[in-house]
Image (cartoon, helix red, strand yellow):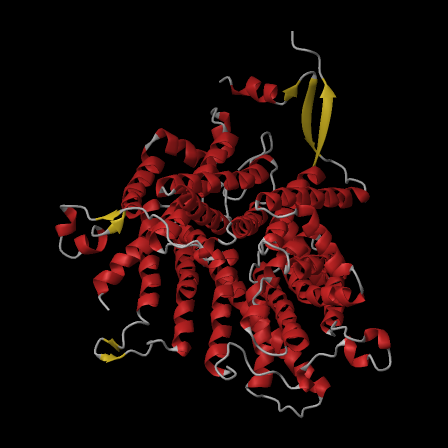
């Protein structure tokens, strides 16, 4: 077991969470909590895989995955923004719908065999950096590199541009944003769509790059929910979201890889295909998510940091807002 | 900005304008029922379109669901068997949702209840010769306790650290599956198979077919006492919610936490208590499923999503425990018949679409839509 190989694979696994987390972060920054990430990711993974099989071109698969998940997210947008329904229940419903549709339309895909995957390559100069080059810039999928670009761009957009300012205004104080002439409804629709597209991209990252194939609900295995948890841990900051995603990615890989070798650090590996310990290892990412939430929530209370003020609240024009 | 006139224009169609106003008075009693039925009809139409898209025959699927679940006494009994775990899981969700406590962990609490009850048989805590009533009582208590513990953890984290209960209960679901698998594969495996040994008959809930000697109609009917437990639980829960002080507090917190706080209701403590009650009900569902149907601990028939279906059922029944009984039977039918429908994801998809259209239809309960004639623009 080579630590560098595990971390390298962990970065790829973490990219899935990264896309989903940043997508959810955009939606929540605009004031809309979307719990449908898991369902949108499944739709994305299924669409990417089946379109790639049909066309032979993974890029068309990725684009269609983003579009499909984006469209699905608009159901949630319509129900919560226009029909003013509870965002929690609607998000749950979206997960059910996304899971159900992807199971129905993905019927038989698991036996479809292999598809053309997205290209993987090393970055010429950066790959020479000792240690970091091997982990981050060697033989990674192109989506991993897109992830590196997305993180600072998302941060810059949210914190330093006019569009980001509007996004934050709508999420913090929609009534004031409305009074200043921003279209609260359109802004929220748009960022829910962005969140959906990124969740679709996360799904495509699984089925076309990280763990190619379609394994019904096990394709995502709860990563959409972990992403929702990571947004809270990240305190709605893309940079923290990226850190959390890569740590979780590495943890997931470690759990898979630790059961392989017979000798671990000179000792007999207690996890070597052991049915007893394997299940406890499986629990770790989920237990870790709960732990991370405890830490994140405590910190938020202490520093008085928190969610966007209008998160979860429908905006009704003319009613006394926040 | 040119936004305001645009917004008005968009709602204008010919000479008519759609106006949306909040409802100031309660709609008549039949109205919510009609809206819900309309929403379900809408969902079936949408689901039918998707089934057709996936290469299935929608009408045939639906006709099959109806025939395979209510066609005769035998399948009706099977429907009730499927409805039983859904009923208890939905009751669990309803009490938590009543307080706007989003317990999505009924699935995990259900699994832990099944595990707790099985541990009594498999550990073994009681021997196979134990009198049946005593055996089942202890198993029921173990299921209640295991579920309550699994509900306590996220409840405590929410009360103490303000940890989002949606995520924590969901994560606990995954942990519960791994925990149950550990015991099934690693400790109680029967000859290396992925299941525990079968329970002795003293640990089986009574089924109707046991009485077929005196009442011949019951021959072959597998409906078990879990259904009775579920109905009793529903009645008790109804009494708690609508006729007790505690129920009033729960409803008050759900409707208006600020008012509850000023009225001196202890919200923190209620979060923990309600999560435990919710977990206990789901755990009881798990116990009823292992002791009434599966008769052994096995992953596939237990971790099959009853907890998630419970969420939809609770919502469809508007959190009313008595209505939950009826809705559970309908969903039992959907799941029972759905097993044979191709493609296999259809029941799950229809459940999701039903939930979406229900939530959307709530809009009609809170707002009224007027179509008014306006003068043509000059």
Q: Is residue A249 left or right of residue B220?
A: left
Can residue B109 be seen here? yes
Q: Is residue A126 left or right of residue A112?
A: left
Is residue A151 or residue B278 the one in the foreground? A151
Is residue B11 or residue B212 the one in the foreground? B212
> Eyeballing the image, is A48 above or below B109?
above
In the rendered image, the residue lying farthest to the top is: B378
Coordinates of residue B82 in the picture (x, y in percent): 69, 65
Residue at 56% over, 82% down? B119
Coordinates of residue B97 in the picture (x, y in percent): 63, 56
Residue at 43% over, 49% down? A45
> Eyeballing the image, is B191 above or below A13?
below
Can residue B162 be seen here? no
> Eyeballing the image, is B367 above or below B285?
above
Residue at 74% over, 79% down? B206
Image quadrant holding the C terminus of chain B, namely: top right
Coordinates of residue B323 in the picture (x, y in percent): 75, 56
Q: How many marks?
A: 0
Residue at 64% over, 80% down? B139
Is residue A137 or residue A36 the one in the foreground? A137
Coordinates of residue B131 in the picture (x, y in percent): 71, 90
Q: Is residue A84 left or right of residue A301?
A: right
> Eyeballing the image, is A308 above or below B114?
above
């Amino acid at each position: 077991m080579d630590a560098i190989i595990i971390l390298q694979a962990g970065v790829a696994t973490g990219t899935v969470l990264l896309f989903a987390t940043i997508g959810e972060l955009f939606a929540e920054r605009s004031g809309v909590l979307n719990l449908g990430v898991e369902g949108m990711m499944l739709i994305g993974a299924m669409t990417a895989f089946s379109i790639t099989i049909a066309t032979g071109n993974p890029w068309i698969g990725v684009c269609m995955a983003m579009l499909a998940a984006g469209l699905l997210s608009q159901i949630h947008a319509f129900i919560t923004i226009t029909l003013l329904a509870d965002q929690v229940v609607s998000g749950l419903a979206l997960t059910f719908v996304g899971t159900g549709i992807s199971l129905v339309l993905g019927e038989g895909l698991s036996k479809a065999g292999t598809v053309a995957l997205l290209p993987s390559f090393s970055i010429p100069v950066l790959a020479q950096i000792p240690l970091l080059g091997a982990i981050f810039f060697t033989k990674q999928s192109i989506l991993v590199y897109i992830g590196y670009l997305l993180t600072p761009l998302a941060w810059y957009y949210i914190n330093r541009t006019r569009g980001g300012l509007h996004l934050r205004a709508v999420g913090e104080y929609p009534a004031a944003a409305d009074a200043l002439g921003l279209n609260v409804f359109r802004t929220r629709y748009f960022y829910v769509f962005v969140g959906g597209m990124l969740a679709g991209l996360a799904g495509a990252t699984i089925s076309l790059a990280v763990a190619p194939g379609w394994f019904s609900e096990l394709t995502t295995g709860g990563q959409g929910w972990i992403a929702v948890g990571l947004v809270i841990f990240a305190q709605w900051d893309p940079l923290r979201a990226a850190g959390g995603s890569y740590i979780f990615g590495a943890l997931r890989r470690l759990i898979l890889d630790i059961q392989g070798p017979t000798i671990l650090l000179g000792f007999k590996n207690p996890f070597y295909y052991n049915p007893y310990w394997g299940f406890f290892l499986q629990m770790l990412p989920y237990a870790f998510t709960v732990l991370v939430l405890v830490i994140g929530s405590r910190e938020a209370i202490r520093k008085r940091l928190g969610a966007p003020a209008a998160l979860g609240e429908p905006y009704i024009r003319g009613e006394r807002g926040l | 900005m040119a936004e305001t006139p645009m917004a008005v224009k968009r709602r204008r169609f010919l000479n008519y304008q759609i106006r949306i106003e909040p409802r100031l008075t309660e709609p008549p009693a039949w109205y919510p029922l009609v809206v819900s039925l309309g929403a379900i009809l809408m969902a079936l139409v949408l689901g039918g379109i998707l089934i057709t898209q996936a290469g299935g025959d929608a009408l045939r699927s639906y006709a099959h669901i109806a025939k395979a679940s209510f066609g005769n006494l035998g399948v009706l009994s099977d429907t009730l068997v499927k409805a039983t775990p859904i009923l208890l899981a939905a009751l669990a969700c309803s009490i938590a949702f009543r307080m706007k406590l989003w317990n999505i962990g009924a699935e995990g609490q259900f699994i832990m209840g099944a595990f707790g009850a099985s541990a009594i048989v498999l550990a073994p805590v009681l021997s196979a010769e134990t009198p049946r009533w005593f055996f089942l009582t202890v198993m029921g208590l173990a299921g209640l306790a295991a579920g309550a513990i699994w509900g306590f953890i996220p409840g405590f984290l929410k009360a103490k650290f303000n940890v989002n209960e949606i995520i924590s209960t969901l994560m606990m679901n995954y942990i519960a599956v791994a925990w149950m698998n550990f015991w099934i594969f690693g400790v109680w495996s029967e000859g290396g198979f992925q299941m525990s040994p079968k329970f002795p008959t003293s640990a089986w809930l009574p089924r109707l077919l046991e009485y077929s000697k005196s009442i011949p109609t019951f021959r072959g009917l597998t409906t078990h006492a879990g259904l009775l437990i579920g109905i009793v639980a529903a009645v008790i829960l109804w009494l708690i919610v609508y006729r007790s002080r505690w129920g009033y507090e729960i409803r008050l917190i759900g409707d208006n936490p600020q008012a509850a706080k000023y009225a001196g209701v202890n919200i923190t403590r209620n979060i923990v208590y309600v999560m435990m009650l919710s977990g206990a009900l789901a755990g009881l569902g798990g116990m009823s499923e292992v002791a009434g149907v599966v008769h052994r601990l096995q992953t596939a028939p237990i971790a099959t999503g009853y907890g998630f279906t419970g969420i939809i059922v609770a919502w469809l029944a508007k959190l009313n425990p008595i209505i939950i009984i009826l809705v559970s039977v309908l969903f039992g039918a959907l799941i029972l018949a759905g097993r044979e429908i191709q493609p296999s994801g259809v029941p799950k998809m229809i459940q999701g679409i039903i939930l979406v259209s229900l939530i959307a239809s709530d809009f009609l309960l809170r707002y009224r839509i007027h179509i008014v004639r306006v003068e043509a623009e000059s």
